[in-house]
Image (cartoon, rainbow, N blue to C red):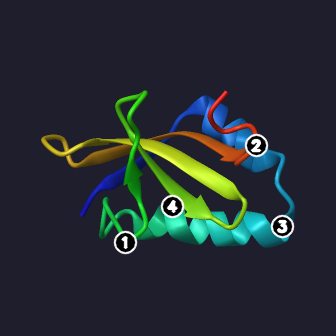
Amino acid sequence: MYEILLLAPAQKDLDKLEAKIFGRILGRIRALRDNARPAGCLKMTDENGYRLRVGDYRILYRIDDAGRQIFVYRVKHRKDAYS
């Protein structure tokens, strides 16, 4: 089981979301505890991390397998996620 660490920029992103999408994204983040690389996640090429789609939003995170930790660093709309 992995420990989920939500970094400050990701927390700010979550605070701005509507309740409906917030619940969906929070559920996917919590599911990362049991499976850090779920079906549909992609290794990012430009950065050292992974991205997970939730509708039009992207959860961007890094995995520390040795420390069993996941660092969620951004939650952005797809149009803003990679800029």
Identify the element where label 2 is drawn: loop
Which residue is painted at 43% across and 67% down in the image? Answer: 40
Which image quadrant for residue 20? bottom right
Residue 6 relative to residue 54: left or right:
left
Identify the element where label 1 is drawn: loop
Which residue is painted at 66% across and 41% down in the image? Answer: 11
Depth check: give the residue in front, 19 or 46: 46
Residue type pointed to by label 1: Ala
Q: What residue is pinned by disc 2?
A: 79
Per the model, the C-alpha gap separating discs 2 and 1 is 22 Å
Q: What residue is pinned by disc 3?
A: 19
Q: What residue is pinned by disc 4?
A: 29
Residue 57 relative to residue 44: left or right:
right
Per the model, the C-alpha gap separating discs 4 and 2 is 20 Å
Per the model, the C-alpha gap separating discs 1 and 3 is 25 Å
* Numbered disc in front, either 1 or 3: 1
Q: Are marks 4 and 2 in contact (CB under 8 Å)?
A: no
Per the model, the C-alpha gap separating discs 3 and 2 is 20 Å
Residue 25, position in %: x, y? 63, 64
Per the model, the C-alpha gap separating discs 1 and 4 is 13 Å
Q: Are marks 3 and 2 in contact (CB under 8 Å)?
A: no
